[in-house]
């Protein structure tokens, strides 16, 4: 048993799930970078494609309205935010650094993707699985095995804010 009261095999499973999520996010980040999705035009084009009847044809019009007034007018800023945020999220999960913070960020990210693709041509349940995996990683102390968070707990103890490690 470890400090969280979990068995070592359970911790290894959580660590492997965390590493897998980190790989998925990091590989997707690289693919999006190559495609130019983090530019103003790339992000705007992608968001418009999501709701275009000839594109993904998502059906949540209220969500499109939110994106149209918040994200699309500032696509250049949000593109940079997305570029940095996805990279840090992927690397944080891969290394087990601030896993609870980045796991929570991944939950928000995958929920956003679920809403973005809802009612369209893509199978949205992928995002439910990724969301639930992120939830499990976040609340399962997944960075405390094979991760930097393990070293942080050993050297600094429990974090001052529970969302950190």
Image (tube, grey):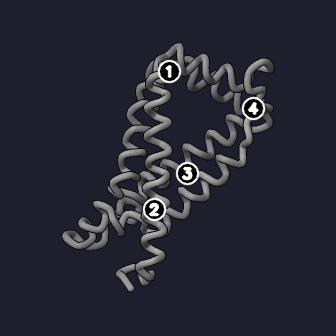
**Disc 1 or 4, which lies upstream in sequence?**
1
**Disc 3 or 2, which lies upstream in sequence?**
2
Q: CA distance from mark 4 to mark 2?
A: 37 Å
Q: CA distance from mark 3 to mark 1?
A: 24 Å
Q: Determine which quarter of the picture holds residue 65.
A: top right
Name the residue that disc number 2 marks: 16
Confirm or deny contact between disc 1 and disc 4 (CB under 8 A). Answer: no
**Disc 4 or 2, which lies upstream in sequence?**
2
Mark 1 falls on what kind of element?
A: helix
Q: In this rendering, which labeled residue sits more in front, label 3 or label 1?
A: 1
Q: Residue at the location (64% across, 54% down)?
A: 129
Name the residue that disc number 3 marks: 107
Mark 2 falls on what kind of element?
A: helix
Q: Residues within 10 Å of mark 3 (few under 14, many from 20)?
A: many
Q: Position of residue 19 (x, y in %)?
A: 43, 55
Q: Residue at the location (46% across, 38% down)?
A: 27
Q: Determine which quarter of the picture holds residue 50.
A: top right
């Amino acid at each position: 048993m470890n400090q969280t009261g979990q068995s070592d095999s359970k911790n290894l499973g959580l660590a492997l799930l965390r590493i897998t999520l980190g790989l998925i996010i990091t590989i997707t980040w690289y693919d999006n970078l190559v495609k130019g999705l983090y530019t103003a035009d790339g992000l705007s084009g992608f968001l418009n494609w999501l709701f275009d009847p000839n594109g993904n044809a998502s059906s949540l019009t209220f969500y499109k309205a939110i994106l149209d007034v918040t994200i699309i007018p500032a696509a250049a800023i949000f593109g940079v935010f997305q570029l940095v945020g996805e990279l840090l999220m992927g690397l944080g999960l891969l290394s087990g650094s601030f896993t609870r913070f980045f796991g929570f960020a991944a939950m928000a990210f995958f929920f956003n993707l679920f809403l973005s693709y809802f009612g369209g041509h893509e199978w949205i349940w992928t995002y439910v699985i990724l969301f639930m995996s992120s939830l499990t990683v976040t609340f399962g102390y997944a960075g405390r095995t094979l991760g930097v968070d393990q070293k942080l707990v050993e050297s600094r103890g429990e974090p001052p804010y529970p969302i950190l490690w």
